Image (cartoon, rainbow, N blue to C red):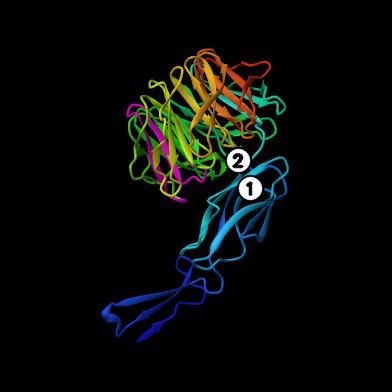
Amino acid sequence: MVLESPSPGWAEGGCVRTIVKLGVLALGIGLGASACHVGGGYTVGGTVTGLRGSGLVLQDNGGDNLTFSSGGTFTFTSGIDQGGAYSVTVQTQPSGQTCSVHNGSGTIGTADISNVIVSCTGAGRYAYVANETANTISAYSIDASNGALAPIAGSPFAATGTTPVAVAVDPNGAYLYVANNGSGDVSVYSIDDATGALTAVGEPVGSGNGPFALLVDPSDQFLFVANKTDSTVAVFETGSGGSLTAIGGSPFSVGTEPTSLSTDPGGNFLYVTDYAQNAVAAFSIAPGGGTLTGIGGSPFGAGSGALSVAIDPTGTFAYVANETGKSVSMYSLNSATGALAGLSGSPLATAANAESAAVDPAGKFLLVSTAANELTSYAITPASGALTAISTAATGTFPLSVVIDPSGAFAYVANENSADVSVYALNAATGGLTQVGGSPFAAGTGARSVAID
């Protein structure tokens, strides 16, 4: 028997390895015996996004404190041996913000943990609206006291592509991404942190035919773009300076006419509404790679014209606004597999074509806009996910997009045919909707998508 030891410090997958060879080398028979991180253990880490305040302190298993002055990746100092538990929690919240931990607990296997996501949010600062017909982006500052909008100097900003139909802000509030349906590409704008003004970054990046919706994952690592005409989702890795690089295998086939995108809070699964297929497709997202793989049972049946999907902040329930079906499909979400299961009473009928859906950050209410030019709030029953209508308010004409600011205090609706944005105060206790003073606020022609920083 011959023992071969690698040079000191060599490791494979984080495990120190000794190779044992039997007999002569010519036999080609080898057995590997691994001793993982002997005396050190595996590390636990992840990413903090959206941090602007000071004072955030994270703990793992009630200790090993880490203090943050800015966002980014992190790793706890202490290691944990295979089979040991880890539990990442917020010991101290940053000033003016609330941070939530996702993928924060589990049992150590045979690799370091690097997918913990700590998402920090506060009051919305800026709002952006894609004006499809005007070929512009409207930009506003948000009054934190009442949610009212005021145009930012230089607004509206010229689109760098043709017919912008969707906007998304990255979790760190550094970039605005715009899907240009006519030119088949994505524009990138840097956001001035102090003013909210937009500056185009480079040339638009091709995504496919008919980009219709986009989404940045919770770790701010990937941008997903739904190409409605191609029936694909393009996946880009986001880089420094706003760069976008298509990952291997992109774009991915996703069904028929994808129209909206949402992930679970931990960024483990992607959900895509297939408008022509009357379904919602579900995919696992490869950690660190972004590759999409269909999960068992997908696609899951929805109503006619499945148009908009929303996931609650605990990753427990999913809701789909069915445009031509005039309903909302309701699902439970399996956090381990990503699979969806229809809830009792699903689908729930709406007064008219359901156009857009959004869940508030506390997971208490679902807001749905309809072609009746109304916005309705529904209370979400915590135990079952069932919906109960609470309040209905008038919107502008053809409300195609509804979002809720990160604090959960205000809701914003882009009205395509009246070229404006309706703003509502959302009562945190009751779910009641009250239109704020000055609403609706003028936007550009064909206002059809709104995003909040």
Q: Quadrant of residue 127?
A: top right
Q: In the picture provided, is 256 more to the left or to the right than 110?
A: left
Q: In the picture provided, is 75 more to the left or to the right than 275?
A: right
Q: In the picture provided, is 19 more to the left or to the right than 158?
A: left
- Residues at badges 2 and 1 in contact (C-beta under 8 Å)? yes
Q: Nearer the viewer, residue 342 or 175?
A: 342
Report the span colored magenta: 264-288
Helix, strand or loop status at disc 1: loop
Q: Residue at x 33, y 30 (%)?
A: 256
Vertical comparison of 117 with 395: above or below:
below
Q: How would you rate the neighbour count of disc 2 (Cα within 10 Å): few for under 14, some for 14-19, many for 20 or more? A: many
Residue 396 rendering spot, x and y as whole percentages? 55, 14
Q: Which residue is mark 2?
A: 172
Residue 391 rendering spot, x and y as whole percentages? 57, 21
Q: Quadrant of the N terminus?
A: bottom left
Would you say residue 282 sits in the magenta stretch? yes
Choose the circle earlier in sequence order: 2 or 1. Answer: 1
Residue 135 rendering spot, x and y as whole percentages? 51, 20
Q: Amino acid at mark 1?
A: Gly
Residue 243 rendering spot, x and y as whole percentages? 52, 40
Q: Residue at x 53, y 38 (%)?
A: 382
Please identify the residue farthest to the bottom as the structure is shown: 1
